[in-house]
Amino acid sequence: MKNVLKTLMIIVLTIGVSVATTLYVVRHTEPSVVIGQSTIEGDSASLPLAYARFSSLPQAGETDFTQAAELSVNAVVHVKTTYKSQQMFQTDPLLEFFFGRPQQQRQPAPQASGSGVIITADGYIVTNNHVIDKAEKIEVVLNDKREFVATLVGTDPNTDIALLKIEAENLPIIAVGNSDDLRVGEWVLAVGNPFNLTSTVTAGIVSAKARNINIISSDMKIESFIQTDAAVNPGNSGGALVNTRGELVGINTAIASQTGSYSGYSFAVPTSIMTKVVSDIKQYGVVQRAILGVQIQEITDQLRKEKNLPTLQGAYIAGVVDGSAAKEAGVEVGDVVTAINSQRVTTGSELQEQIGRYRPGDKIELTLLRDGKQLTLTAELRNKNGNTAIVEKNRSLDVLGADFEAISVNTARSLGLRNGVEVKALKKGALQKSGIKQGYVIVKANGERVTSTEQLQQIMNNALQADAQEHVIFLSGMYPNGQVAHYAVALD
């Protein structure tokens, strides 16, 4: 009996100790919610009695941009431009008679700066057209402080891209990535020289893609920008937008701001556009612009209801140009283009971007919706003249029908000019038809000062690329006898 009583007492004491221990732990332990490996402490009086543990969620590690910055910062350059200064002349003929031709009063040459990206080890550099537009001199400063005078290889105002060249070797470059692979929310870095602060790196995310903000004034503009919230300011233009792997995915071009400084929105030309433009400039000297020949309208909910469209995604065809690639392929007003060569198209900007990747003569497959049914059509893209010919670099000067040569120092001095291009060996062509004679010195073309035959070539190319029924270039200059003459030269 004594043994039984001892056993019962031990059991009771054990139960009592267990209950007391449990009550003590409950009363003196703060509840917590565990999310991954992070613990959020809470007050037992304010949290519910049931607690959730989300240990299956992935851990959010720290984002490290150091490698991407190291891979890109040395390949981003500082682009400095110098423009012609304004010259002030006394024009009183009486004073000139007694005292001779007055001395020129020169204002300091205006300067500006931007950024550029080295894409080849032998010195090809991509920047924005607006960074170097109308510049008299272009200088490039590398991250290691070496300085070079750059040559303008070519420009494309339709995409705001320009290609420069410096004479150097073994330069650091950025690997060109595929901007199509970018996703909204992905981290990116903007590398450039804002406010002359060289080698500046900022970070943000991709806020949107295929954004059209109507900042390019060209008639054949292609706007399909990458929008980010990486801080970009004046001086960043032409710089690199890179992903976290250090690959170039865009050329920083513009900001949306009421003040002229960064306000949270910046825009970059995607490499999908840049790569094609640069390739054309290097190969042909001018961009080969392919045209589908349609008028595009964005699909809104109102348009969808009005036209009884089956989708809000795609590019609505509001018009088809007679004799165009689209017309020949069978595209009709009311069609909705949803893909180009199986690449999805959700907006008019994306359609422009896709077409901008091709050249005249390329054949593409158009996927579209018509009356609720999906169709696939094949179109052979054409140029602005309605054919598939490639525009060669020297075509514009051939059209003019002359040989050209930069004026000599003696000629410049005798005419009171700093520079110009002289018409040599006049042949049958546009200049002769316009009444221009051999020896004529071209000082300006379409309002731009002409400093070299290469610059004249580029102005001609831009004039031929313009979307117009007739292509005309306006020349201002003078003859060796000092006679000033102006001409309108038809290029077609």
Image: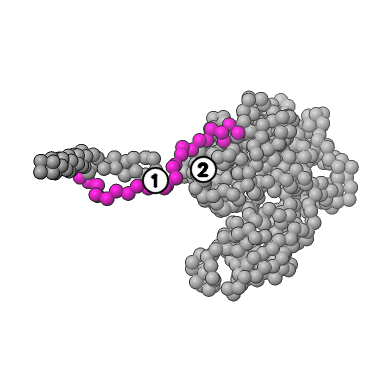
Q: Is 439 colored magenta in this rendering? A: no
Q: Quadrant of the N terminus?
A: top left
Is residue 477 at least partly visible in the picture?
no
- Disc 1 marks which residue? 55
Q: Amino acid at mark 1?
A: Ser
Q: Amino acid at mark 2?
A: Trp
Of discs 1 and 2, which sits in the foreground?
A: 1
- The image's colouring method is one colour
The reply, left or right, for residue 15 in relation to residue 51 is left
Task: Give the class, few, some or many, for how many residues have Cα within 10 Å of label 1's Cα (few <14, many ≥20).
Answer: few
The residue lying at 54 percent from left, 30 percent from top is 197
Task: Give the class, few, some or many, for how many residues have Cα within 10 Å of label 2's Cα (few <14, many ≥20).
Answer: many
Q: Which residues are magenta?
A: 45-71
x and y percentages locating residue 124 in the rendered image: 71, 36
x and y percentages locating residue 95 in the rendered image: 69, 29
Q: Quadrant of the C terminus?
A: bottom right
- Disc 2 marks which residue? 187
The residue lying at 34 percent from left, 43 percent from top is 34
x and y percentages locating residue 332 in the rendered image: 65, 71
Q: Is the magenta region chiefly helix, strand or loop? A: loop
Viewer-side residue, 338 vs 100: 338
The picture quadrant where one finds residue 6 is: top left
SS at mark 1?
A: loop
Q: Is 51 colored magenta in this rendering? A: yes
Alpha carbons under labels 1 and 2: distance apart? 26 Å
Viewer-side residue, 219 vs 179: 179
